[in-house]
Image (tube, grey):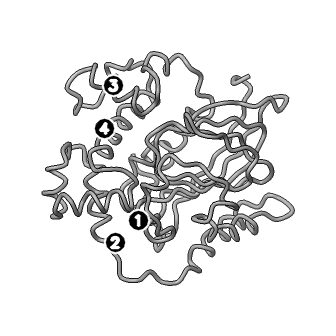
Amino acid sequence: MSHDLSITVRFHPPPEDLRRYFTTFYVTRIDVPGNEPVEDALQPEWANLRIFDGAGPVSWFEGGEPLSGARFTATGPSSRPCHFRLGTSRFWGIGLLPLGWHRYVGQQASDHANLIADGHRHPTFAPFAPLADGLYGDHPDEAAELERIIRFFRSFEPAPESDEARIMAVHATLVDPQVDTVAKMVDHVGLGQRTLERLCHRDFGFSPKVLLRRQRFMRSLAHFMLDPSLKWIGAIDSQYHDQAQFVRDFREFMGMTPRAYAAMPHPVLERFMQERKRMLRAPVQTLDSPQGAAPDLP
């Protein structure tokens, strides 16, 4: 079935005034032969809003209740894979950077970690329901839909004085491969460790230690997904002391061994990552800079 699967995805970097809040705005069309559902799993990522033109997927985090058929799904920041099953569909995705979570959601991110919710029913995401309700017209119109997304987020009241500079500084340390300990994070951002802990839980969803480990893991996983010929030993990030440490992280963040993951099909995610890498340089949103995705760079 995956051989005949058709996936079209286009990424749109937000305009300059919104870029520090969002990873990308992206539209995806999936055509499944015979409309037999395809299954895959999202890797750990920042928060996302996904608005479907029609019925949504069945989605679930391990151990959680499945969400079925919601046209507007919202996920908090994650440290686990989010599984999904869907048939032929078309949808827009909106990736929220940590600063975007702070600006547009304003709730404790750690309370929404590894959460998938019906955006029409969950109170945290209620402010975005008007966008979900008004995004689509009678016929698909990518340019008009993108303009509605941009106009919607520009319509929010100006942000009050906030921790914007500190959030962006913390985010910058996460995407710096040279920063591999919480002590180095503290030194780079100039915050006390307890202040750093509070800020990370509030806007990033996890402790500084977990965030650093997730970044190290995602660099390795993205490397492998883009070039499986490397085998795992060639994809492991230089911050890992040995392969056993990587395997422990893999079990924690993906719930399985690297060998088991490599043996599974990833029909949606592989194509999504390849196209994201081609258009935006970073294959996954956790590797985006605090300024958002960087288009058209080698």
On residue 216, the disc is 4
Residue at mark 3 to residue at mark 2: CA–CA distance = 34 Å
Which residue is painted at 23% across and 29% down in the image? Answer: 240
On residue 99, the disc is 1
Asked whether disc 1 touches disc 2, contact meaning CB atoms under 8 Å apart, the reply is yes
In the structure shown, which secondary structural element does the residue marked by tag 4 occupy?
helix
Name the residue that disc number 3 marks. Answer: 248
In the structure shown, which secondary structural element does the residue marked by tag 3 occupy?
helix
Residue at mark 2 to residue at mark 4: CA–CA distance = 24 Å
Which of marks 4 and 1 precedes in the sequence? Answer: 1
Q: Which of 197 and 167 is in front in this view?
A: 197
Which of marks 3 and 4 precedes in the sequence? Answer: 4
Q: Is the residue 243 above or below the residue 192 in the image? A: above
Name the residue that disc number 2 marks. Answer: 164
In the structure shown, which secondary structural element does the residue marked by tag 2 occupy?
helix
Task: Count residues near mark 2 (Cα–Cα under 10 Å), then give few for <14, some for 14-19, many for 20+.
Answer: some
Q: Where residue 33 sits in the image (x, y, percent)?
A: 81, 29
Task: Count residues near mark 1 (Cα–Cα under 10 Å), then give few for <14, some for 14-19, many for 20+.
Answer: many
Three-letter amino acid code at the position of disc 1: Leu
Three-letter amino acid code at the position of disc 4: Arg
